[in-house]
Image (cartoon, rainbow, N blue to C red):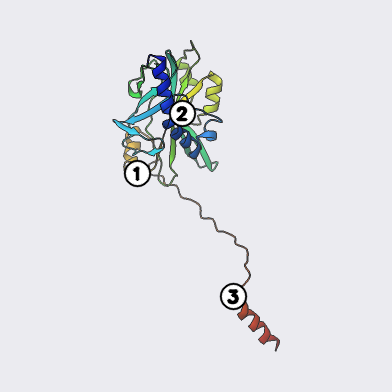
Amino acid sequence: MNKPIYRYLADKKWRKYQRLIIVQRINQLAIVPDVLPHFEPTAEVRIAFRARNVQPGEFIDSRVSEVPPRLNVQVFDKGERLVTVIVIDSDVPNVDNDNFAKRCHYLATNIPIAPTETSLPLSKVTDAQLVHPWLPPFAQKGSPYHRYSVFVLQQKPGQALDPAKLKEKVQRDGFNMRVFVTKFQMTPIGIGIFRSIWDEGTAGVMERAGIEGADIEFKRKKVVALKPKQKARGWEARHASAKYKSLRR
């Protein structure tokens, strides 16, 4: 991958199949426009939990995703660059407003990658790069499945951010990807997607991570459909007509 011809061939191969799949998942799961208004991947991002490769959009057991994943980020243009990695939950229930909010489950910055340096274990990111450590994905009982997006954002050449200042400005709850990208002038280059739902291990994962709310169950409000009155048909219509005639007699 340090030679242009091999980068070109690898990019061509990726665009024929794997890129089509991730773009399909981005559209199917409405990552665009829910998280970003527009996004065209230019780098391949693969996710692995405990040596288990994750297919785009796959449901992952909460006990498997309890630990940070290892990313494989393959870029196809030459040179080293710094990237920021953000993991977002797009489906956090907001009971007060009867809608969904977003939460940042992981944020690290100033991570160097290159065409020949693709391995990125999130658990081995240094304290000087880490803004928000890994918060295990979880979906409370009764809530719909949660979409988790692992974004890789390329920083401007020569741009190095201060994780301490970022931690003060960027909160986990109510995270806004659009504002973050615009404010720090980053370019989204790659994404990995997986999903989570309540399972038999979720309560234990939440307890070990110190997350409250494992005893909460969401229930949908029952909506009574107001159907318009329908005209009688068939034997009912004939029966009603005969009854009306008998009354007239």
Residue sitting nearer the eye, 246 or 206: 246
Q: Earlier in the sequence, mark 1 or mark 3?
A: 1
Q: Amino acid at mark 1?
A: Asp
The number of numbered discs placed on residues in the rendered structure image is 3
Rendering coords of residue 101 (x, y %): 51, 36
| Relative to 3, 174 lies left or right | right
Rendering coords of residue 20 (x, y %): 46, 33
Q: Nearer the viewer, mark 2 or mark 1?
A: 1
Q: Which residue is mark 3?
A: 234
| Relative to 68, 170 lies left or right | right
Residue 199 numbered tag = 1
The span from disc 2 to disc 1 (Cα, nearest Å) is 24 Å
Mark 3 packing: few (<14 Cα in 10 Å), some, or many (20+)? few
Q: Amino acid at mark 3?
A: Gly
Rendering coords of residue 196 (x, y %): 39, 39
Q: Residue at x 44, y 39 (%)?
A: 146
Q: What secondary structure is found at the residue carrying circle 1? A: loop
Q: Quadrant of residue 202?
A: top left
Q: Residue at x 62, y 79 (%)?
A: 238
Q: Quadrant of residue 125?
A: top left
Q: Which residue is mark 2?
A: 172
The image quadrant where one finds the N terminus is top left
Tell me, yes or no, whether the two marked residues, 2 and 3, touch with CB atoms within 8 Å: no
Q: Quadrant of residue 69?
A: top left
Q: Earlier in the sequence, mark 2 or mark 1?
A: 2
The span from disc 2 to disc 3 (Cα, nearest Å) is 61 Å
The image quadrant where one finds the C terminus is bottom right
Q: Residue furthest bottom?
A: 249
Q: What secondary structure is found at the residue carrying circle 2? A: loop
Q: Earlier in the sequence, mark 2 or mark 3?
A: 2
Q: Nearer the viewer, mark 1 or mark 3?
A: 3
Mark 2 packing: few (<14 Cα in 10 Å), some, or many (20+)? some
